[in-house]
Amino acid sequence: MDYEHNSWIWEGVNYYPRVFGGLMVTAALLGLSTSYFGGIGVPYLSLPCSWSNLGIFHKKKSGKRRIRVYMDGCFDLMHYGHANALRQAKALGDELVVGLVSDEEIVANKGPPVLSMSERLALVSGLKWVDEVITDAPYAITEKFLDRLFHEYKIDYVIHGDDPCLLPDGTDAYAAAKKAGRYKQIKRTEGVSSTDIVGRILSSLRNKKSCEDHNGSEVKPQEENPSQASHIAQFLPTSRRIVQFSNGKGPGPNARIVYIDGAFDLFHAGHVEILKKARELGDFLLVGIHSDETVSEHRGNHYPIMHLHERSLSVLASRYVDEVIIGSPWEITKDMITTFNISLVVHGTVAEKSLNCELDPYEVPKSMGIFRLLESPKDITTATVAQRIMANHEAYVKRNAKKTRSEQRYYEEKKFVSGD
C-alpha cells in the first residue's frame, strides 16, 4: 500500500489525539521505538486492527489512470537498439503497448523480413519492458488506426525514435500522430541497426566463403573492401547502459539458481524460448555469455556477428533473465558453481556445433548430478538466421540500399529547410 508524505502522521495527531496517543502508548508497551513511526514502516506494524481503517492515513488516490504509450516497429533481427528504444518508451508512461508490423506491410514498405511474425512476436513479448503487443500493426499510422489506438487501446502517446521513418512516397509515417499532438520522441541508439546487422552477416559469410575457396585452391582470399569494413560495430559500452538494462537485484538467501551459457549471437526466438524454459526451473536465472575469442575459437573466425557487450545487452533485456556473466568461461568449473551458488546447470538440445569437441564443458556439473538437458522449443539457430539472409542475398542488398537512399534524401531535405 502506498502512502503520501509523512504529513499524515501530524494530521492524525490533530484530528485524533487520543486515539493516536493510545496507539503510541501501546507501541511503547510492546517495546517498539517511536522512531519507527517516522516513515513507511508504520503500515507493517503487527497491530490488532488496520490503521488505515481509522482514517488517519490518507492513501494515495488509486483512481488516477495509468499512462499508456504505444511504440511500433518491424523488430526484425531484434537487437539491443530495439530493446533500448522500448526501455526509453516505457519510461514515458506506465504501460507500454507495442505494435508489431505485419509481414505483408514490411514487404510492401521495406522488403522481405528475415524473421517470421511468430518469431518477432516471441522476441518482443519476451522483453522486460513490454506490457502488451498488438500484432499485424500497419507500417503507417493513419488517422483511422490512430483513432483505434486512442479509443480501443486507450493510448495516450505514440512514441518513435529521432531517426526518420519514411513511407515509399517519402512522407513521414508518424505525421498523423504529430498532427494530433500525441507524439513523443526518444533518442535513437547509435551504433546498430537491422540494416547494419544484415551487412555484417553478408560480409562475414562472404569472408568465410573466400577462406574456404582459398583452402581448396590457389585462389587468394579477397581483401576487405570499404563497404565490408563499414560493418564493424560502432557500439561503445558504458556501465550506465548496463545498469539501465539490469534488474539490480540479487538472488535471495535460499534461491534456486539456474545457470545456462552460450554465445547468444543474433539474439533470436530460440534464445527467448530456452531462457524462459530455464527460468521456470528455479528462482533466479544466471546466464553466462561467452567472450568473442571463445566464440571464434569454437565456431570459426567469422563469428560472432555481434560482439560481447551487444550480446550481453540483448540477453539482459529478456524478462526471464536475472543476471549475466559477461565473458563466461567455456568450461564450467566447481569453483564457479560454488562462487555463484549454482543449483542447476542446463543446456538446450538445439545449439551450434563446436569445432573443438575434445572437451565437454559440462563435465563437472554432470559429475555433481546438477546438469539437465532441456528440449529446445524451437530449432532456429544463429546459423539458420544467417542462411536465410544469404538465400535472399540480392533482396536484402536492395533493401539496405533503398533505406540508405531514403535516409540520405530525408537528411538533405531537412538540412535544406533548416538553411544550414
Image: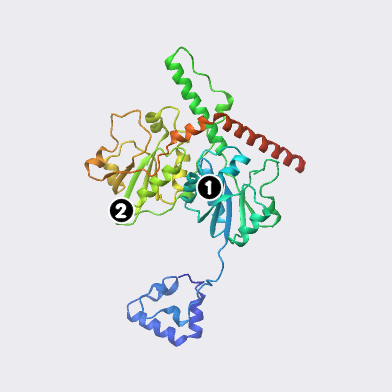
Residue 45's x, y, as percent? 37, 74
Which quadrant holds the N terminus?
bottom left
Label 2: how many Cα within 10 Å (few below 14, some 14–19, many 20+):
some
Q: Who's the residue at 55% across and 27% down the image?
A: 229
Q: Sequence order check: which comes first, mark 2 or mark 1?
A: 1
Q: Amino acid at mark 2?
A: Arg
Mark 1 closeness class: few <14, some 14–19, many ≥20 residues within 10 Å: many
Is residue 217 rendered to the left or right of residue 393?
Answer: left
Residue 242 in picture, x, y percent from top left? 47, 46
Label 2 to label 1: alpha-carbon separation: 29 Å
Of 393 and 25, nearer the camera is: 393
Which residue does the numbered mark 1 point to in the structure image? 84
Q: Is residue 157 left or right of residue 384?
A: right
Where does the image place residue 97, in percent across and percent down from the top left?
A: 55, 55
What amino acid type is highlighted by mark number 1? Answer: Asn
In-front residue for pair 40/130: 130
Q: Secondary structure at mark 2?
A: loop
Q: Quadrant of residue 378?
A: top left
Instruction: Name which residue lies at 51% across and 47% down.
Output: 83
Q: Which residue is mark 2?
A: 256
Q: Is residue 111 left or right of residue 125?
A: right
- In this view, which residue lies farthest toward the top? 218
